[in-house]
Image: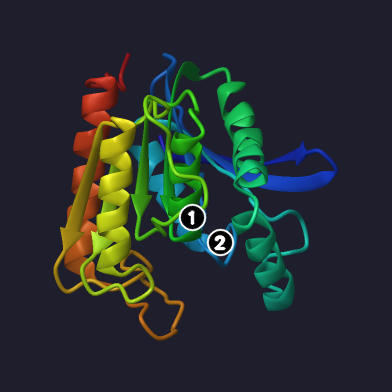
Amino acid sequence: MPIQTKAIGYRDGDTELTGFLAWDDAGKHRRPGILVVHGGAGLDNHAKGRARRLADLGFVVFACDMYGNGVAGNRERVMARITELRSDPAKLCQRARAGIDVLAAQPGVDGRIAAVGYCFGGMTVLELARSSADLAGVISVHGSLDTSRPAQPGSVKAKILVCHGALDPHVPMKHVSAFVEEMNRAGADWQVIIYGGAMHGFTHEAGPYVPGVAYHAPSDVRSAALMQSFFLELFGPEDRKA
């Protein structure tokens, strides 16, 4: 059966949001949920496509909206919203948690939830982990690693996987080193995988076409395979035919 999708409207306080739910009706049993957090452009075809891929693996997937209705597609509004959320990690996490609430409320979700973020979304899921979010794991794919609110010892509950491009000029290696030190101090369960030849945004087949951002097919394929392995570690094998 093909992947089913639908738009879901929801709110974070006064902000109206519209997310994208994807699931496979082939199995009627409850299963883990995956939150997908989009990149800087907003909830676009890339984020929706990644949600469909994860749904095809047997998960219930919700690609959340971090910006609100009427923001994506307007560069001035997008930049203002990014600046607003980056400067306030608590607000950033609150916005993402609104998406987690929608996902957790889906009847097909068994209570186990992980989060995957790309670029801006990668930064978001790491901030969720730093905030002690009750998630099985988080995956940051070419996301920002620096923070104004470092994780405190014992605060990180989620297992962490970071997929990083070795040639990423927007997240230099000094940020990688600082992140490793931060996670060690916090006592987190973490992995950082660095892909040679990859720059920022290495999973974005269609751009954006800006300096330092480029699609890199080998790293896209390798990181996708690693994500599957990470989910297997978190959740065990899924019987999609049950």
Q: Is residue 86 left or right of residue 16?
A: left
SS at mark 2 in the image? loop
Task: Locate residue 143: give its quadrant.
Answer: bottom left
Q: CA distance from mark 2 to mark 1?
A: 6 Å
Q: Position of residue 59 (x, y in %)?
A: 40, 30
Q: Is residue 65 visible?
A: yes
Q: Report the label total.
A: 2
For this rendering, which residue is in front, 93 or 174?
174
Q: Amino acid at mark 1?
A: Ala
Q: Identify the disc placed on residue 47.
A: 1
- Circles 2 and 1, Cβ within 8 Å, touching? The answer is yes
Q: Residue furthest left?
A: 196
Residue 160 visible within the image = no
The answer to whether residue 22 is above or below residue 75 is above
Q: Is residue 203 above or below residue 90?
A: below
Q: Amino acid at mark 2?
A: Asp
Residue at left offset 33%, top offset 61%: 175
- For the rendered model, the colour scheme is rainbow
Q: Residue at x 26, y 48 (%)?
A: 180
Left or right of residue 180: residue 63: right
Within 10 Å of the Cα at label 1, are there few (<14), some (14-19), or many (20+) other Cα atoms?
Answer: many
Viewport quadrant of the C terminus: top left
Which labelled disc corresponds to residue 44?
Answer: 2
Residue in the picture at 64% in, 45% down: 19
Q: Please state, as top left, top right, bottom left or bottom right, where the N terminus lies in the image.
A: top left
Q: What number is the disc on residue 1?
A: none
Q: Is residue 186 left or right of residue 38?
A: left
Residue 168 lies, in percent from the top left, at 30, 72
**Going 23% across and 35% down the picture, which residue do you hit?**
230
Where does the image place residue 204, in percent across and percent down from the top left?
A: 38, 68
Q: Residues within 10 Å of mark 2 (few under 14, many from 20)?
A: some
SS of the residue at dot 1? helix
